[in-house]
Image: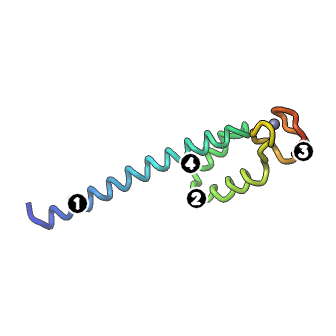
Amino acid sequence: MTSEAGTAITVIGIILVLILVLSVSYIWFLIWIWKDYQKYSEETLPWTIGAAFLFVLILPFYFSARKNNKIVCSKCSKWFPVNLPNCPHCGRNKDAN
Ligand SMILES: [Zn+2]
């Protein structure tokens, strides 16, 4: 084997490892979005499908939607829509501390 062939095999190997790592990260990220969004919304599927196809594009929207539309209940620590006056899980008023 010449050194050039060895270099080519090394480069191909590195590319294959990179593709593998990216694929695993991608799948892990989609699972993470799925589970993360399940905590406070039933609209998990559209977000996960959106993230799968639009990946980079959907991320800012995902995080802004996550941040703006839900708050954490101070009593039960569950997420609920910010437009509700009371937590649907435990009934605590969101303005109460
Ligand atoms: Zn609550």
Q: Secondary structure at mark 2?
A: helix
Q: Secondary structure at mark 1?
A: helix
Q: Earlier in the sequence, mark 1 or mark 3?
A: 1
The label shown at residue 52 is 4
Q: Earlier in the sequence, mark 1 or mark 2?
A: 1
Which residue does the numbered mark 1 point to in the structure image? 10
The C terminus - image quarter: top right
Which residue does the numbered mark 3 point to in the structure image? 96
Mark 4 → mark 2, Cα distance in angstroms: 9 Å
Marks 3 and 2: in contact by CB < 8 Å? Answer: no
Mark 2 → mark 3, Cα distance in angstroms: 37 Å
Q: Taking 19 as reference, is 90 left or right?
A: right
Out of 77 and 44, give the one closest to the viewer: 77
**Residue 13 placed where, x, y %?**
26, 56
| Of marks 1 and 4, the one in the foreground | 1
**Residue 83 placed where, x, y %?**
87, 47
Residue at point 37% right, 56% down? 18
| Of marks 4 and 3, the one in the foreground | 3
The label shown at residue 56 is 2
Residue at point 87% right, 37% down? 92
Marks 2 and 1: in contact by CB < 8 Å? Answer: no
- What coloring was used for the rendering? rainbow
Whether ligand 1 has any atom under 8 Å from the Cβ at mark 4 is answered as no
* Mark 2 nearby-residue class (10 Å; few <14, some 14–19, many ≥20): few
Ligand 1: image quarter: top right
Q: Earlier in the sequence, mark 4 or mark 3?
A: 4
Residue at point 68% right, 55% down? 63
The label shown at residue 20 is none
Q: Residue extending furthest front?
A: 97
* Mark 3 nearby-residue class (10 Å; few <14, some 14–19, many ≥20): few
Mark 1 → mark 2, Cα distance in angstroms: 30 Å
**Residue 11 placed where, x, y %?**
26, 62
